[in-house]
């Protein structure tokens, strides 16, 4: 079996891709690793795919896949994971900011130290403050919610045991949460390695500040889905029961108040039950509670019957 599979998602990186592949090859060959480089073109608009096909002709270790349009980094990584044949899978970005010189150390942490997943930590970053401060806050929140003590969840340079990538499915923008998904799949030996972060040599970053907003939404999604996808009634049913009980108690209180005023205190009724705001809150609580309970019941049926999988349209492959 191949020692290392290097998976590189790329989008409009025609200037850097050849230099990166040559660098990866030098590092692996100098350490005697058997390896493959899997380049996944995420619908580039430039000549990136032409560069990939040329590299595949020149280097038998290079394989590639091209999407018909831009699906996103998660789709590219998921496709690359499916193609990978190595014992250890290493991911890195195509912009040359991740150094292939880190490959031997990452490989050894998986094979010799027994980790399931090792994430890079760009301790010294060459990014503007507008990117580093939101990133630190994002990583802090993710650490608190996931319980995984990593400093840089979004680092593209990571190493995985083969079993991890073959059992972790990505969708949407979940690539930054692979450690979280892996942990909830039972791969909890997660480590960290300080890695070198290099200045961007070509082009400009493809990511904006909106990725942090999407990132928090994705974190909430994956937290809820991972915990309740096999038991959705626990999620919907809990809120449903609470809402229903609130409505029932409020309605009971109004009825008791009415009966007490009429039969026990002989005090004239100031307002009818239907004229009080609490009556409508109680009614809404009961209705929403029933709807949430029914939603949980239907979700339970779907969870038991569904067999979903990711499908991305790959229009060409090489190698």
Image (cartoon, grey):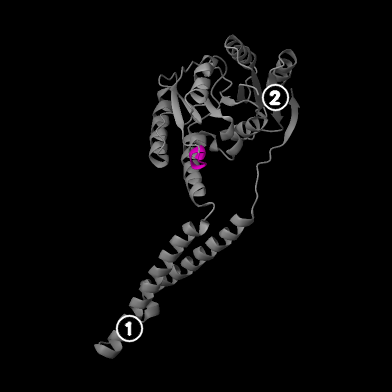
The answer to whether one can see residue 271 in this image is: no
113 or 68, which lies in front?
113
Instruction: Give residue 147's quadrant in the image.
Output: top left
Whether 283 is drawn above or below 24: the answer is below
Measuring 39% from the left and 28% from the top, which residue is drawn there?
Answer: 133
Whether 283 is drawn above or below 64: the answer is below
Measuring 69% from the left and 38% from the top, which residue is drawn there?
Answer: 312
Q: Main secondary structure of the magenta part?
A: helix
Q: Which residue is mark 2?
A: 64
Secondary element at image label 2: strand
Disc 1 versus disc 2: distance between alpha carbons?
75 Å
Image check: 40 left or right of 187? right
53 or 281, which lies in front?
53
Which mark is nearer the camera, 1 or 2? 2
Image position, residue 181 (x, y; %): 51, 39
Image check: 201 left or right of 122? right
Magenta stretch, residue numbers: 181-186
Image position, residue 81 (x, y; %): 63, 31
Secondary element at image label 1: helix
Measuring 61% from the left and 31% from the top, which residue is drawn there?
Answer: 77
Measuring 59% from the left and 55% from the top, which residue is drawn there?
Answer: 303
Judge whether residue 78 is colored magenta: no
Q: Which residue is mark 1?
A: 258
């Amino acid at each position: 079996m191949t020692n290392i599979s290097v998976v590189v998602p790329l989008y409009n990186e025609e200037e850097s891709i050849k230099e990166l592949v040559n660098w990866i090859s030098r590092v692996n060959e100098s350490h005697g690793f058997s390896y493959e480089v899997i380049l996944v073109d995420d619908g580039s608009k430039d000549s990136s795919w032409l560069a990939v096909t040329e590299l595949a002709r020149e280097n038998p270790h290079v394989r590639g896949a091209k999407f018909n349009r831009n699906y996103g980094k998660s789709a590219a990584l998921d496709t690359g994971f499916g193609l990978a044949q190595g014992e250890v899978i290493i991911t890195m970005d195509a912009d040359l900011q991740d150094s292939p010189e880190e490959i031997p150390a990452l490989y050894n942490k998986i094979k010799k130290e027994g980790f399931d997943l090792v994430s890079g930590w760009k301790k010294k970053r060459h990014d503007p403050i507008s990117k580093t401060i939101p990133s630190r806050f994002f990583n802090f929140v993710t650490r608190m919610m996931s319980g995984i003590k990593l400093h840089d969840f979004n680092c593209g340079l990571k190493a995985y045991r083969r079993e991890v990538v073959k059992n972790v499915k990505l969708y949407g923008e979940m690539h930054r949460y692979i450690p979280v998904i892996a942990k909830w799949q039972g791969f909890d030996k997660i480590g960290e390695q300080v890695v070198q972060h290099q200045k961007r040599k070509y082009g400009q970053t493809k990511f904006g500040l909106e990725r942090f907003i999407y990132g928090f939404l994705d974190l909430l999604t994956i937290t809820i889905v991972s915990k309740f996808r096999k038991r959705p009634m626990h999620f919907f049913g809990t809120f449903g029961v609470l809402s229903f009980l609130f409505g029932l108690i409020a309605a009971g209180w109004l009825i008791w108040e009415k009966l007490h005023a009429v039969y026990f205190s002989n005090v004239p009724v100031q307002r009818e039950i239907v004229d009080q705001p609490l009556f409508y809150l109680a009614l809404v609580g009961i209705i929403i509670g029933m709807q949430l309970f029914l939603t949980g019941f239907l979700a339970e049926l779907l969870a038991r019957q569904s067999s979903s999988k990711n499908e991305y349209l790959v229009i060409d492959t090489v190698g």
